[in-house]
Image (cartoon, rainbow, N blue to C red):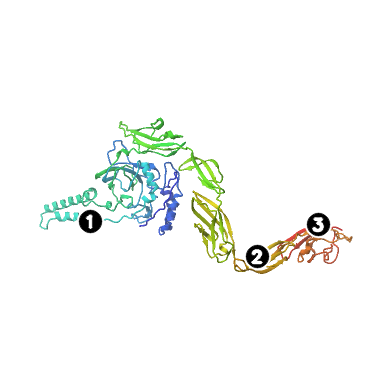
Amino acid sequence: MLKITFCDCSIAENTIFANKHDIIDLYSIYFTFTKHNKTMNAVVRIFFILIGLSASYVFGACPFSRYTDVVTACTGANDLGIVYPAGISHEEVSFFPLRPNKRTGKGYTHGIGCVDETPSPAWYAIKIDHPGELLMKISHSNYADIDFACWGPFKGDSKQAMLENVCANADAYFVDCLVPNTTNDCKQMQLDQCESKFAVGPTATAIQKIESKEKISDCKESVERRSESDVEYECFYGNHDAFPIGQMADCSFSNSASESCFISNAQKGDWYIIMVTNFSGTAGNICFSKISGSASTDCNVIVDAGSNSPVCEGEDINLYVNNMPEYASCKWWGPDGFESNEVSPKIANVKKANSGIYYVQITTHDGLKSDEVPVYVSVITNTPVDTTIRIVEGTVAKFKDVEFSKAGDYKLTAESGQCAKIFNVKVVEEPLLPAFIEQNGPICEGDSLFLSIGDAPDSGVTGYIWSGPNGFHSTLECPVVSKMNQNKAGEYSLKIKKDGLIYPVAPVNVTVIPKFKNKVTQHIPFGESFDFGGETVCDRGVYTATFESSYGCDSVVELHLIPDMPKLEPSDFFTPNGDGENDVWLIKNIEYYPDAMIRIYDRFGNNVYEATEYGLDNAWNGKNKNGRDLPSTDYWYTIDVQYSDFVIYGHVTLLR
């Protein structure tokens, strides 16, 4: 037998599960992939939760979808004419796991416990009035085949309170259970004794043989009947003896139109939930009657009245009677002078005054009145709530998903349970502590880092939170980081827990001096020098020196010195007319870039001039590569600094 267990999930208040015919094809696809993989069971369950629909009076994940799906019933006399209709939907309980269909050998059905299929289910709740053992008969008014499963005991002052508890723990209460095969050895022995007790010998007359058969038949009939219905009988047995299993009190799966349900050690006030399946879908009523036992059920609760309580102030209260007898009338009354003759009245835009106990009484067509049934209704008011939040200067505190970073008085509306609440929030800002971090850095690679706290607070401290590079974390007051390396170099921070707040302390940067060769790139302004290893250097290049620190951390440093060169400023025009002024194209600061490649192009893209080591002696004088004068016009240039990655583009005007 395949067993599927479900994960613990909660469903929004307005969620109802889809029916089997809506989702069975998709479920079958998932089942193909999961029936041999227990780890995928939760995926199957979540898949069904996501395709929920909307309805009223709905709660968390449960085999039934609404409070009103569960009807209160009892095994006593019912003079009010209240009936318990059988289910006729033909749909199974999709909450229960799929199993291979034992009856047909084809496909899968939704079963639980000993119930292999769950077609046309109806749900009932009974409440124990007097304690003891209870054997009750469950039957169909039109003699149709029914089966059942019973769970309990459950606690609750009312049916609604009981169902809220049940559905909050449905995955624990309605788990599948393996029902062991049971045989009634005691009954079989009694049946054998009927044979031996009334048997006659081979010489008996025909009349004696007939009488013997009748006595044996009567004896066996009595044994069969008592073993199934008499709890005091020594051989009382059946599926009952396999239960309870977990929260399942009893169940039966047979082709009979009536079943017997046994509840042992029932206690006053306990609730039991019974699912009765209607295999054929035949219309009719389910009948409950007591067979034997000292326990009894409470028939004062069968007027199944309830509400959508609790509700938020400003919403509507919906009252209802779930099993109103035919041709009967109804009267409601309650707080704030409320009265109504409707079966399901609504009170709109409720206030706190609408909280309290509502009563309903039904009157049959022949004048018989029910007890006054109480329905408890709670209205959650929106009284502002005052709260104070303390924060540390520069930090952020979150309240009801709202962040606060400054002192002041605030008002916000936020969800609180199922209703919105107004909160008056006072934010008090505490100053930072004067504490600071002390450390013995810089650290030679391989040595230990010692961290401590300067100006630490004297009292109220409940803890320390250190963090740093390479996943460092500590709750010690003065932690030590051993075997320092470059991965452990960097910023170390501290938070101090004090008087219920967390105070951040300014972080420190810890330097680890390596013992190996380092490469350093240094930029200096043009024309300035740089002291390195006892020498003064100013030219671009690579320099190497060995440094010995007072910490004993010797390192070979390779310095890449890069002077920041002056900016190139090409002239916008020149006049090569031989007058001795502005006869060549000048580029200011080009002497500092002797390797720069200068190229000149005419408007057709032809390269008319190019040169390196550009200066006054070889500056462009308006001639092309062949020494011929170029006409007056605009020319385009590129200045490519060879050792860098930048190229200057622009145009210059030649005037004659």
Task: Please identify, in this view, whether the residue under mark 1 or under mark 3 is nearer the observer.
Answer: 3
Determine the CA span between mark 2 and mark 1. Answer: 93 Å
Where is residue 517, by image quadrant?
bottom right
Q: Amino acid at mark 1?
A: Asp
Residue 141 appearing in the image: no
Question: What number is the disc on residue 572?
Answer: 3
Say if mark 2 contacts mark 1, CB within 8 Å. Answer: no
Determine whether the residue tagged by mark 2 lies in a helix, strand or loop: strand
Image side of residue 69 versus residue 183, left or right: right
Q: Which residue is mark 1?
A: 185
Task: Please identify, in this view, whether the residue under mark 2 or under mark 1 is nearer the observer.
Answer: 2
Q: Amino acid at mark 3?
A: Asp
Q: Which residue is mark 2?
A: 520
Considering only vertical position in the picture, is 329 above or below 223? Answer: above
Q: Quadrant of the N terminus?
A: bottom left
Q: Amino acid at mark 2?
A: Val
- Using a 10 Å C-alpha cutoff, classify the residue at mark 3 as few (fewer than 14 neighbours), some (14 to 19) or many (20 or more): some
Sequence order check, earlier mark of 1 and 3 = 1
Task: Please identify, in this view, whether the residue under mark 2 or under mark 3 is nearer the observer.
Answer: 2
Which residue is the extreme one toward the right?
Answer: 579
Image side of residue 309 versus residue 648, left or right: left
- Using a 10 Å C-alpha cutoff, classify the residue at mark 2 as few (fewer than 14 neighbours), some (14 to 19) or many (20 or more): few
Q: Residue 179 at what x, y percent from top left? A: 31, 55
